[in-house]
Structure formats: C-alpha cells, structure tokens
Amino acid sequence: MTDDLLERHPVHALLADGTTVGIRAAHPGDHDRLRGFYEEMSPESLRLRFFSIGRRSAAVAADRACAPAHRGYRALVAEADGRVIGLAEYDTGGTDGTAKAAEISIAVADGLHHRGVGTLLVEHLVSAARSEGIAAFTADALSENHAVLRLFADLGLRMTRRFEGPEVRCTIHLDQDNAYLSAVEASGRAADVASLLPLLRPGTVAVVGAGRTPGSVGRAVLNHLRTGGFTGRLFAVNPGVDSVLGVPSHPSVAALPKTPDLVVVAVPAATVPAVAEECGESGVRALVVVTAGLDDTQAQALLTACRTHGMRLVGPNCLGVSNTAPDLRLDATFAADHPRPGSAGIAVQSGGVGIALLDGLSRLGIGVSSFASLGEKFDVSGNDMLQWWESDGRTDLALLHLESFGNPRAFSRTARRVTRRIPVLTVDAGRTDAGRKAAASHTAAAATRTMTRQALFIQAGITATRSVGELLETAALFHSQPLPEGSRVAVVTNAGGAGVLTADACAEAGLVLPPFTPAVIDELLAVLPDGAAVGNPVDATAAVSEEQLSACVDRLTRCSGVDAVVVALVPTAVAAATGDDLVRALTSVPGRRARPVIAVRLEQDRSVLLMPAADGGTVPSYTEPQAAARALAHAARRSAWLARPEGTVPEPDGIESERARAVVEDYLTAHPDGGGLDPRTCAELLTCYGVPQIPWAWADCEDDAVLAADRLRGFDGRVVMKAHWPGLVHKTQQRAVHLDLRGDAQIRAAFRDLETRFAGLMTGVVLQPLADRGTELLAGVVQDEVFGPLVLFGLGGTATEVLADHAARLAPLTDRDVHELITSPRCAPLLLGANGGTPVDLEGLEQLLLRLSRMAADLPQLAEADLNPVLATPGGITVLDARVRLLPRHSQDPYLRRLR
C-alpha cells in the first residue's frame, strides 16, 4: 500500500502470537503518546535505540515523527488497545524525491519484543519506500543490539554490514525477490495460524442467542456442540434462563465465569454490533456470526469491533465452523448431521454447498478434518484456511468453494506452496461474465472472468471442477489412489459396449489409450479366457473369472506404457452362476497397486463410491464413465503440474522503469481521468520495455504524409496508412486503414479519403511500411480490479474475437508461465513449425510476453495494453498495431501483510 493510502486508511495486521495490531502513519495528534512511548522505555532500550540514555533524543524523535509529512520521510506507528507499541521511520534527508536511499530507525515498546512488531513495521515501510522509488535502507546499530540485527537479517532482503568500532552500518536493498516474499510468507503464516487457534481449537465456547424455542439457529448450534462431544467448556448466553439444553446459561458475555475463546453469535442483525463490542471488551479472541441481513452500518460496526479488539471473525451469514480432532470434537454449525472425522478440509462461502460437501465426504468415508463456512467473508478467508490445513498435521485434501477472492495474488502464492503438499480442489463458481460484452479492445473482450479465474487456478496448481458432484468425484480418486504418472489409460471391461463408452469418455477428457506392445498382448492373452480381445480397450468377455480379471489388471498396472487402469464392469448371469465377484478382483489384492485403478459400474446407484480394499485402502467406483474419466484427467493434470519446475520470473534486459513511470505520470497529469495514449506516447511507453515495433511515422496533413511515406518506402516501397483519433479502437471495422499504397498520388488520395470520411474526428494518420507475411497474433494485458494484471496471448488479427483462441496467465510471469502461454492456444502448432514448417521466433515471443508482464507489474495505471496484430515470423517478432489505456490508480502491494 502506498504511503498516501496508508495516511487515509490505517490497516490491521497480525503479530507473531496471532494478536492484531493497527499500522498507520504518525500524525501531529500522536505527539503526547509518542513522548509517553519513549518515556516508558528502560534506559537500556533507549541506549540501544539512541546510543545514549538521555531523554533528549527521544523528545526529538517524537517531534520529528509528528511533523507534517513530506516526500522522503515516513513514520509509521503500531498501536494496540489505543496504545502506541512501535514506531518505525525512514528519512532520505531530502524532499525532492530523487534520493535512492533512506535512513531507517525502529523502536518497540518494552515487553513487546520478539512478537514481530518491528518486522511488521519494517515490511510496511519497505512497501511505502518502494512506491517513492527508494532502493535501499541504511541503519546504524550497536553491535550488541542483536534483536535489531536479527530483524534486518530475517527480512529476506539482501543486506551488507560494515563494522565501525562498536557500531554496525547496515545497508538493506529493497528488491522484491522471491527470498523476500518467502520471508514475508513465513512470518504471515505463523501469525495467521496462531490467530486461528481460538477459532478452530478453542478451550471455551459460548453461544449468544441460544434460545428455548425449538428450531432456532442458536439453539441448533448449541445442541451440535453439546451432542458432538465438545471437550472444552460450553456456555449459553441468554438472559432470564439458567440453562439451555442442559448447558449453563448466563445473562451476558461479561457475566460468564470464564472468558470464552470463541463466541458464536446468533442474534438479530440489529444487536450483532453490540454483542461483538461486548465480546471484544471481555477479551474474546474469535467470533462466528451466523446472523444474516446486516446492513452496511451494522456490518462496519461489527468489523470495527473485531479489528479494535483483535478478534478473528467468520461470517456473517454463515453455517459455522467445526474441527473433528478427537481431543476437541468441535461442531459449532447447524448442519443436519455431525461431520464424520477424517482428512479433508472444507472452506465454503455458501452454507448450502457446505452441507452438500459435508454429507458427500461423510458418505464416501473420507470425512472432514476441519470445516469453515465463510459466509460474507468479512475476515477469515480461503487463504487463512489453506495455511491452517498446511500446518494442522491432519489434512491431506483441501476443498474450496469461493465466490470471490479478496487478494488473489496472495491467495495464488499461498496455494502454489500448499498444493505441492496436499491437493487443493475447488468448484469454479461464477463462470459467466456478461459485463465485458462492450469491452473496449480485443484484449479486454478476450479477458473474461472465467479466463482470469482459470489462469489463477492453473498457475497455483489448483484442481478446478465445474460442479459439486465433480468435486466429490475427483476428491474420491485423489483420496484413494496414487497419482498417475501421465495420461495413458488402459480400459478393461467384461462387456464390449461398456468398454467403448469408457474409452470414448477417456478420449474426450484428454486422456490417451495407447496400443499395447506385442509382449503385453501375449501376456494378457495368456491370462484371459478364449475369445478375449486385447486391444485397448481390453474386452475380457462375460466369461472372465475373478482370478483372470485380477491377473489382467495386475499385469496392466505393471506395464510401463500405462499410467492408469479403468475397469468397466456390468453384472452378468455368467458371473452369478460361477460365484465370481468381479468387483472383488479389484479390491482383494494384498498391497497397494503401483498405478491407480478405478472402476466403472453402470448399475451403481450412487455417482461415486469408495470400495474397501484388502490392503486397508479403497478403490473408487463410478456410475458414469464420464465421471471416472474427468476425475482421472484431473489427477493426470495434477501429476504433470507437480512434475514441472516451479519456474522463476526472468528479468528482461534494457528495461527503463523510471522513464516509463515518468511517461505515465506526465500523461495522467495532462489527462487526470486517464484514457487511450496517442501513437507517440504509446510507442514511447512500449520502447521503455523493449517491445519491438514496426517503423512508423505520424502525419497530420497530406504533405507530411507524402514525406513520411518517402522515408518509409526504403523498406519495400509499399506503405500502410491508418487514421487516428482519440477513442478509435477497431480501425478495420471503421474502414480507417489503407493498405499497399504506392507512390505519392496514392498516398494523397488515401489521406484525402480518410480526412473526408472522418472529418471532425481524425487528428492525423500513422504510416508504416507494409509488413511481410507471417502469423498474426494477439498479446496484451488487462488490469483486473480483483485479480491484478492478466497477460493474454493467442491468435490475432481482425478475427481474433470470433476465433477466440487465447490463453492467459496472471503477472508476473515465470518462464514456465510463458512457455504454457505460447503452447496452450490451438494455434500453437503453427508457431512451432507444424507439417514441416519453420518455427517462428519463439525466443522473441517469450521476450515479448515477459516484457508485457514486467510493464504490467511496474505500472498499476496500465488499464489495458492491446498489441494486435503481432507479426510472428522465423526472422522475428514485430508489433504492427498497439493500443494502451491508462487510468489514475494507486499501487497496492499485494503481498503486504494486512487483514481484509
């Protein structure tokens, strides 16, 4: 968050012990409190901070922090319970904004050291300094001040030290690389998990609003806590009654004999803020608000109470939370049944979806480790729950149903880390987006909300399904079977028709049915009955016995050319007469098979079941071949994602970020509401990032057009003329382009035509040499207000929207992201040299996308950049037309630690 935003919008963040602290800019009204802050420090703390024990330096420091803000100086305070507990400052020593280094100082109240106050303040100072163009902090510290030296060392930033007698001169470089982001993540993860302990592992719980009326929500929650066997202390809060359902009741939270860790609030919306305030004043650490229907004022009052008093909040308008740990047995929900203990973590916004997942996982026998119905998600989010599951030691499968993302880039970074340890599955909810029908450019039209969400899921390694049913079907496979090493599938059946259906479903899901080698065919024929067909699929015939089927499946799971086996079975009179149980052939093998085996049973009454196996595991069984194939395809994609290197963000050479920022600042100064750049400014901005552009010239009259064409004819003699006026987007649709112009007469005629048809609009023309033949592509950036910058790539030209052959990834792009962007569109074979053709300049394409990604990451004001067409040939990559639109936006650090 930039410093000016922090001035107006103080933020809250978590300390290492999970408590909440406010971070804001110091202002003149803090003077007395800052004097008191320093006066309460011990002589030793003052000596370490000011190199002396005198109070004069402290008074000067308070005066400086409370002076009017100016460029090059920032002071941030941390406060809790109305008390200043920390102060951090940087000062460049100048006010013109040109300094690249600043002196930093930190002070933390006695008794609050080693809780992360200083680290949090410095992280916020780093973010503010970067927004001012400051590249390094310097600091002098006594060599015995181990706490501050350790703080600097643990930031994850590159640091150098120079010892000067008893002092150490530290220089901290503010580059935001992966080491720094990982350090911020580690601090945030520990703080986040600590803050969730009162919510998900409370020792004492109270339910406010648990009444005597059967059917009330509060009473249902209390009953679930009671009958679920919660191992801690349980209270009801209801004035006028001594007990509810046998649980002791008290008139208020303040009257409880023990302060609860967690309070469930089930009262009318109008009284929720007062209850929350009372909870905060009583020392409660977490709230679950199941109440719905809060208006904006009530909602803000609820969140303010939680932030002021450091309470984590689930809801409002939620189903509740549960944790099935045997030493806790917390079920603070009003679901129909208690969740079955197990290993799947669930976080949903919709209570209805939550109930369906709880029921489905319990029915499958997977069970639930912990569950959170996030409701309107005022505070606790899917990101919080991912970090909880990562550290709880019980969860091996994470299921999400999120309708919105508060901080998608932070979520993506967390998910990338978590999903390398446990599968993370989601339902891709809200896939439609009618709001972009009137998009201003080809890039914006292509960047649908579905594409943006899919980019997030793909980059983060999240398995995205299209329905709750598909989510459960996939979870069953992930829970019960090893991941396939690839997408090669063998299909075995006892009925030819079922095998054909299954083979079709696998092929449609993107799986491959490879032919078997002669050696495998011979081995299969040796174990199967006469008449069996051993192509792929394998038709073992209705005569196959349990023993024969088991031998066939075992051989296929040991085959190096097969990654998974799907067995499609139908009940037959033959098997019934012989007493063979073909299903048992899949489940009775001692020891787990090396490759996944799944069943398709068309007569099955449930969409998916987990059949107990002899080795103590389970085998998934599906009613529909399509469901089995979808689940297996998801497993193959996860396996491929895990096998890929994580990727790094390359640094293209020749980037002029400061010059680009100056171009943007100059434009927005002249156009405060933003808008599309004129050709000159657009070209200058792209040049700052080394984007290759075709030579061009500007002309605002006929004679200038002739002169410009003469200069450009040196390329091949033919030129293109394009009209320009502010707001023009689709030049071809407007017939505002003349191609293949030769000679002065054609140049003059073309200019007059455009000038006549677009009189009063046209401000001039752009002339370019006629480009060579090649593949026309689109590359662009859209700044999504929620997800951040999205880089798009695909087939370009005038038909780009009709063909809709595009891929997208969220910036900043790694080298892996760039590779996938280029190879994902259907047109990729054209670029790679299909049918004996010569590949285009792939390295040039990679560089173009990396440079667009860097531009998007550098410039939050970049609303969209539309490069179409981009001409790709074996000899190089050239942008033939570009459109850039800027908006006045403040930068916001997506990785800065702060609560919602």
Image (cartoon, grey):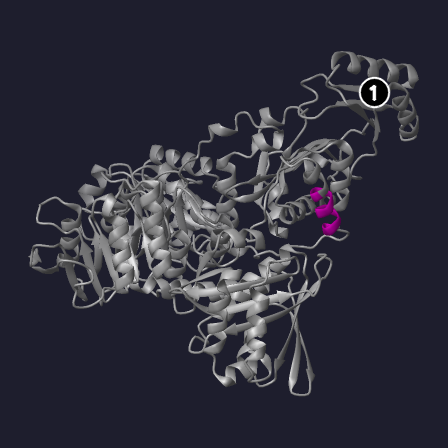
Residue 291 lies left or right of residue 655; in this view the side is left
The foreground one among 269 and 360 is 269
- Asked whether residue 560 appears in the rendered view, the answer is no
Residue 526 place in picture, x, y as percent: 39, 49
Mainly helix, strand or loop, the magenta region? Answer: helix
Is residue 890 found left or right of 758 in the rendered image? left
Find the magenta span and give its range.
Answer: 657-665
Q: Is residue 417 above or below residue 521?
A: below
Image x and y of residue 467, in percent: 36, 38
Determine the residue positioned at 83% across, 13% down.
752
Q: Is residue 662 magenta?
A: yes
Q: Nearer the viewer, residue 541 or 363?
A: 363
> Where's residue 484, x and y in %?
45, 52
Left or right: 708 in relation to 66: right
Q: How many circles with numbers are drawn on the protein?
A: 1
Q: Nearer the viewer, residue 292 or 240?
A: 240
Q: Secondary structure at mark 1?
A: strand
| Amino acid on which the number 1 mark rests in the picture | Asp
Q: Residue 678 in the image: x percent, y percent?
A: 74, 32
Label 1, on which residue?
A: 740
Q: Is residue 298 magenta?
A: no
Q: Which of 171 and 851 lies nearest the eye of the viewer?
A: 171
Residue 625 against residue 372 in the figure, above or below: above
Image quarter of residue 645: bottom right
Res 346 visible: yes
The picture quadrant where one finds residue 227 is bottom left
